[in-house]
């Protein structure tokens, strides 16, 4: 459902299984949940045709990006999706946009500024360019892209689709990091928003990215030398893990 192994394990114990492949046709009364990162319209239709009851738990912010991307394509914009090609959220946005586009070549995923520069001639060949960004990306990435394209594309439509809570978390954590000589970021190493949070804070102060309190044992020396320690966490990190980390830090 989300990028957090503790939550996935908890759901598994409740009988909610994570699968890569579905049985076709669906066993009687089978339910398939669409995870928070979303899925393509074609994938959802395929699941329904197999006979599953579909419960769509796509994050509302992710849904908005999908809709925004499809509308830009319908309005004749060459679409840039800023994010990681292999991330499930980006995959669903790309697939839905390409499904809507007359020409699938008019949708391009860009992971960083270097990749943008490599593809600039392709992008410049279009009069209208629209931009959406993965909800858990860094605002700095969007600013870099806009700054690079602003004098190269006449009709540039920028949609800041970064999740508000992600942006707020990054800003608040950055302020906390300025007052701390150590920041502890709790959350999955597979989580984009948690990883970006750690990257941002590591530029401000010493930063540890851990998944649970057990990992703190590996950093005792660093922890003991710190006078002010700040704790933050990714969107999918459960409260009980944050609490355990806080208690463990106190004992160290």
Image (spheres, rainbow, N blue to C red):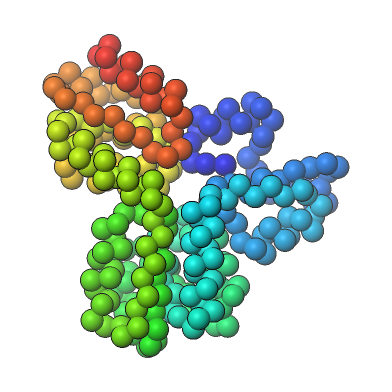
Q: Is residue 88 visible?
A: no
Q: Quadrant of residue 145?
A: bottom left
Task: Give percent across and percent down for residue 215.
Answer: 34, 24
Q: As drawn, is 226 to the left or to the right of 129?
A: left
Tell me what residue is drawn at x 57 percent, y 54 percent: 38
In the image, residue 88 above or below residue 172: below
Of all residues shown, which one is farthest toward the right?
A: 28
In the image, residue 183 above or below residue 31: above
Q: What quarter of the picture does the C terminus occupy? A: top left
Q: As drawn, is 226 to the left or to the right of 49?
A: left
In the image, 159 versus 111, the foreground residue is 159
Q: As drawn, is 17 to the left or to the right of 2?
A: right
Counting labels gives: 0
Tell me what residue is drawn at x 20 percent, y 22 percent: 223
Task: Give percent across and percent down for residue 19.
Answer: 65, 43
Tell me what residue is drawn at x 23 percent, y 32 percent: 183
Tell me what residue is drawn at x 33 percent, y 49 percent: 167
In the image, residue 138 above or below residue 142: above
Q: As drawn, is 156 to the left or to the right of 220?
A: right
Q: Is residue 166 visible?
A: yes
Task: Give percent across and percent down for residue 132.
Answer: 41, 66
In the image, 168 versus 224, the foreground residue is 168
Task: Give percent across and percent down for residue 130.
Answer: 41, 75
In the image, residue 41 above or below residue 2: below
């Amino acid at each position: 459902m989300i990028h957090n192994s503790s939550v996935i394990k908890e759901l598994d114990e409740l009988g909610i299984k994570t699968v890569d492949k579905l049985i076709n046709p669906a066993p009687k009364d089978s339910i398939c949940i669409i995870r928070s990162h979303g899925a393509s319209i074609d994938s959802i239709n395929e699941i329904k045709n197999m006979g599953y009851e579909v419960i769509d738990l796509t994050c509302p912010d992710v849904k908005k990006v999908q809709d925004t991307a499809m509308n830009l394509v319908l309005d004749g914009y060459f679409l840039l999706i800023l994010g990681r090609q292999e991330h499930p959220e980006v995959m669903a946005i790309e697939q839905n946009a390409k499904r809507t586009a007359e020409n699938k070549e008019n949708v391009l995923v860009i992971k960083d500024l270097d990749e943008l520069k490599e593809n600039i001639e392709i992008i410049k060949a279009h009069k209208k360019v629209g931009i959406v960004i993965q909800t858990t990306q860094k605002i700095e990435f969007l600013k870099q892209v806009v700054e690079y394209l602003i004098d190269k594309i006449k009709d540039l439509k920028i949609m800041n689709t970064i999740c508000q809570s992600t942006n707020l978390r990054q800003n608040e954590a950055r302020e906390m990091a300025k007052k701390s000589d150590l920041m502890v970021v709790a959350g999955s190493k597979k989580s984009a928003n948690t990883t970006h949070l750690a990257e941002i804070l590591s530029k401000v102060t010493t930063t540890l990215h851990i998944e649970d309190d057990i990992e703190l044992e590996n950093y005792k020396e660093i922890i003991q030398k710190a006078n002010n320690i700040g704790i933050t966490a990714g969107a999918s990190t459960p409260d009980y893990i944050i609490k355990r980390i806080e208690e463990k830090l106190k004992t160290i």
